Amino acid sequence: MSNAKGYLYMYMSFLSTLPNMKSLDLSYNFLIEASSSSHTKQGSTVSFVGLGKLESLHLYGNHINNGILPFLGVLTSLKTLFLGYNNFDGLLHMEVLCGMKRLQQILDLSGNQFKGNIPSSLITSLSSLSHIILGYNDFEGTFTFQIFANHSKLDVIDLDSAGSKLKLETEHPPWVPLFQLKTLLLSNCNLKKQSNNAFPSFLSTQYNLREVDLSHCNLSGLLPPSLLKSNKLFSTLILRNNSLRGHFFLPSYVHNAARNINISNNRIDGLLQENIGNLFPNAKYLNLSKNNFESGNIPSSILQMLYLDNNSFSGNILREDYPSATTYGKPSFRIHSISIESNKFTTPPFARKWIHRSPSIALINNSNLLTLDIRSNNLCGSIPDWMGALSSLRVLLFQGNHLNGPIPNHLCQLEWICLMDLFHNSLSGSIHRCFNYISFGRRIEKESISNIKSEGLWGTRSTEVLAGAVEEIEFMTKSMYFSFRGGILNFMSVMDLSFINLMSDIPHEIGTLNGIHALNLSHNQLIGSIPKAFSNLKQIESLDLSYNRLTGKIPSELTTLYNLEVFTVAYNNLSDKTPEMKGQFSTFDSFSYEGNPYLYGLPLPKTSFCSSSGESTNTFATTLNDMENEDEIDMTAFASSFAASYVVCLLDLPLFSTSILIGKECGFTSSEHACTHVMIFFLMLIISYAFMDADFVCLFGKP
């Protein structure tokens, strides 16, 4: 049943007429338990009487509260009970559940607000259970795994985020499990100090594991070498954000079941085994980032999603000995995402071979590559020609390298790009007009990245991801660094070409990228005017054109960009009046416009006018419109000063004539006469212009 919105008791009278019903699923409705409301006083309570043969009850994802618990006792045949993601809260009084001796399959109480200790009596009395799911609650106290010692049928233990104050004791008292787990989910749990935060030792007895998540568990000590070797059915291993150390030991056999491995943010060291991709031929996701892996080349057997950032890998990204895209004679897997950010990779010291490498190698002969993140390495040379062959690429991150030469126009062939970051390189040249061929969020079709799924990356859930971006992708937008992950990346579109020494005008074709959210062209040497076509960037939230050589007027049409949150054209050579302060432009302060000496208007401060003493108190540009409405000019001082300069100008001519007479009386030669005349004449002009310039400064202000 679905969408059966209302009180639960309203449906039980009908359902109780089905005495032979064995399975009831009311999940994901808006059912409310009303036993504490006025309906109870009228006898309208929830009753499961008549459902004595019910074996499976699914009430997952409703608004049911504790009031239903007393009525579950009549379900003596129940084997499976799903109460997850409801409104249960308080202490877990489970006398009723403890009496359900036949509950032998699944007990799911996850996603509620249960508090206090997890009752040991609940676990010990239900020794036939195969699934115990208690995650995402607010439990506290200490929970001892020895309680599971007699659960021989146990397949799944899920205590994911079961409580920030909950402590797990896996080692004491000593115990030996009778079960063989398939799934163990303990993320965001605290291992008790008595366990020394060591890796749970009981896992060494397990050989049927499929999925383990021990992320954020404060684990320390050595990474067990037998974990992967002993479990040939292992599909997902997540150990991120711990303090595990030692080497990453790989199995000696081909592990076909492995799909997703994440041991990021630990202290794993050593060399990464060259044949890792061959040993995990079906792996989709490998995250080894933020560890201490030693210097070495990227393994030639690349996986579908490879995260090696923040290690110490070095050498050449692409090498002559990369094999063709086959594994054991079969077509190789397809690469979706590569991240090698913050390593020490370089290009060959002589010929820039990585630039001219043939795209037939395993890394490039792959139209499914979606993310390429090689930020913060030591790469030099020009951007390689084979980039244009990556027709499915969505994310291109080259920030913080030493790439030089012009931006190649074959980047225009990457029509599906939504994040392009070339920030802080030594590139040059111009912005290509053909960049308008790139999507930058304009096209969302069925083949969009939102349809690329990675199964089971977190627990048993299936999550839509962008280009394998299960981990955060960090980039600058709105003048700040943000980290984005998962589905939100499907809606982000950014182009950052700042700090790369561009020396051209801004092509008006960039104004057709009406799906872009952030555009950063700052700290270049761009010339010309700001294109009026930028008014078409209706989705833009951040526009940074600062620190260039742009001239002309800021287009008034930009005031129609109603999503714009960050705007700066500071430190250019722009002139004329600033855009009208309306819409989003009413939120921008003077810092958005500073450093443009010929720009005036709000929100720039006005120039203070000259006082009667003739002293100027401010050097900022003033607005003529504001000046016309204010009587701040001392007109008496202005008139007096102007009259004095006028008199000086009139005296120039008689003084010039007098100088001629004086010269003749003194016996000057004609050439000496001419020199004297010119010097006296120019002296008079300088004095008169000085008077007049002071007058105009007082009247109009400094430009």
Image (spheres, rainbow, N blue to C red):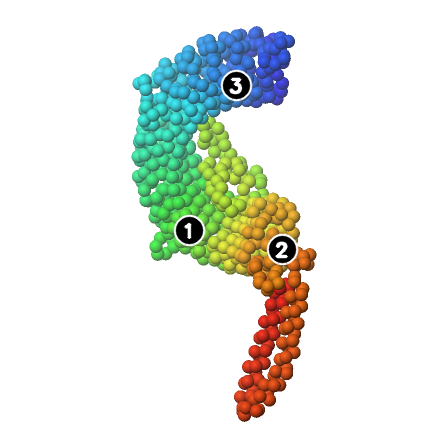
Q: Residue at x 40, y 30 (%)?
A: 216
Residue at the (33%, 40%) spot, across then down: 293
Q: Quadrant of the C terminus?
A: bottom right
From this viewpoint, is residue 505 visible? no
Q: Earlier in the sequence, mark 2 or mark 1?
A: 1
Q: Secondary structure at mark 1?
A: loop
Identify the element where label 2 is drawn.
Answer: loop
Which residue is rendered at x = 40% and y = 14% of the image? 120
First in residue order: circle 1 vs circle 3? 3
* Tag 3 residue: 88
Question: Closer to the N terminus: mark 2 or mark 3?
Answer: 3
Local SS, label 3? loop
Residue 229: percent from left, percent from top:
33, 29
- Between 579 and 626, the one lying in front of the other is 626
Q: Amino acid at mark 2?
A: Gly
Within 10 Å of disc 2 (Cα), the crowding (few <14, some 14-19, many 20+) is many
**Camera-nearest residue between 325 and 53:** 53
Residue 350 position by quadrant = bottom left
The tag on residue 401 is 1
Q: Position of 247 compared to 158: left or right?
A: left
Instruction: Determine the CA span between mark 2 and mark 1.
Output: 40 Å
Q: Amino acid at mark 3?
A: Phe
Crowding at label 1, few (<14), some or many (≥20) Cα neighbours within 10 Å?
many
- Quarter in which the N terminus is drawn: top right
| Image: 294 above or below 608 | above
**Residue highlighted by disc 2:** 601
Nearer to us: label 2 or label 3: 2
